[in-house]
Amino acid sequence: MQRTTRRAAADTKRQSDADTFSRNSNAAGQASPTNYQRGPSEAARLDMYFVRSRLRLRPPTRGRTARWVCRRGPSGGASARVCTNTHGAASRLVALDSHLDAGDSGPSSAWRASAVTERNWLLDISTASPTFAPFAAKRRRRAALAPPPTLANVVLPLRQWDGYVGPWEDHFGKGRKQAYPLVGVEPKPSCAEVEVVKLLRRCCQHAFWVSCFNAEKLPDHWRPYALALYELPRWLREIDDDIRTRIASATGGIPDAAGWDDDSPTASARFLECKAIGESVRESQQDWVTDAIANHFSISQFAVALRPY
């Protein structure tokens, strides 16, 4: 009985949506429902995530019939138009312009809006749907210069190393944080940073682990995947020097892995910070990424790779 009542209420709500959609479309003289606007409270619940090679939207409610849902940007034009399927599952993105309003679409809207114009490079890192979380340090000694960015987080299917660990020199202090290779069979043992670099090389011509501290002490089997700060290409060194004129950290903070192409290194750059699930962000990391997004890169060029153990 309760299920029948809920079903009837849902049908009534869908009919009301359809009537509103029709009135707005007719008022604008358009055949397509590009004037239907969801309320901010519902729009804020939309959760965009990546599925295979397409951007998709998860609707906040389930419906039994296909219907169009459109949202408007601050300029008044339609920002996004999506169509929910008959099972209320993920909806295919049809159009999304650069006017996605952060106040209307939730905390991850800036990352999503920026990523729309770019190839979904995260698919080369993990096929799992990313989650979004503020890239913020839990403890700070200085006030942040700007609010923390909200970045995509993807979990890597890494298997923890259970073999012989050896002395510090063999693992650079990684110990039981080491992992079995995720791509290929070497090096063994590996670590999250090395595996992320190997994954980044799928979508970038160059990719390296940026080691800010004692890169020369890295184990020999990891060193081909890493660069010290002074070994970075000139364009990235200049950006790093510029960022450090505004943040307190003199060396640390740059994400663990960076990838780029020769033709347009800044536009093609991809940055991944490696963390364990639940591991906190450091103050220098938040400051570097926040300043980089504000002055040099788009927010969708950054993400966090999570180690599951």
Image (cartoon, rainbow, N blue to C red):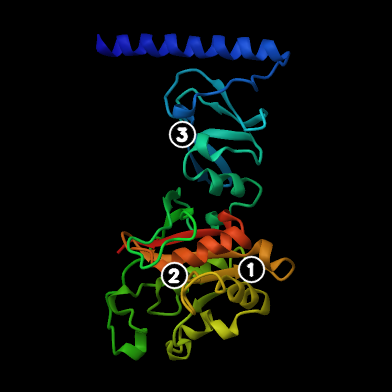
Residue 282: x and y in percent read 38, 67
CA–CA distance in space, label 2 to label 1? 23 Å
Name the residue carrying label 2: 284
Give the quarter of the image for residue 18.
top right
Q: Amino acid at mark 3?
A: Ala
Element on which disc 1 rests: strand
- Between circles 2 and 1, the one closer to the viewer is 2
Front residue of 19/299: it is 299
So how many labels did they put on this image? 3
Tag 2–tag 1 contact (CB < 8 Å): no
Using the numbered discs, state the Cα–Cα distance from disc 3 to disc 2 in whole angstroms.
30 Å
Amino acid carrying label 2: it is Ser
Position of 162 relative to 72 (above/below): below
**Crowd tier of the residue under label 3, counting other residues whose Cα lies within 10 Å: few below 14, some 14–19, many 20 or above:** some
Q: Secondary structure at mark 2?
A: helix
Which image quarter is the N terminus in?
Answer: top left
Q: Residue at x 49, y 79 (%)?
A: 250
Label 1 or label 3, whichever comes before in sequence order: 3
Callout 2 crowding tier (Cα within 10 Å): few <14, some 14–19, many ≥20: some
Along the line of sight, the residue nearer the viewer: 24 or 91: 24
| Residue at the extreme front | 143
User: Does residue 79 appear left or right of residue 30 in this picture?
Assistant: left
Crowding near pointer 1: few (<14 within 10 Å), some, many (20+)? many
Amino acid type of the residue tagged 1 in the rendering:
Trp
Residue 299 higher or lower than 209, as above or below: above
Residue 44 numbered tag: 3
Task: Give percent across and percent down for residue 56.
Answer: 54, 38
Q: Which percent across, then down, holds residue 137?
A: 37, 62
Which of the two marks, 1 or 3, is nearer to us in this view?
3
As measured in the structure, the alpha-carbon distance from the residue carrying label 1 to the one carrying label 3 is 33 Å
Judging by the rendered image, the residue that carries numbered circle 1 is: 260
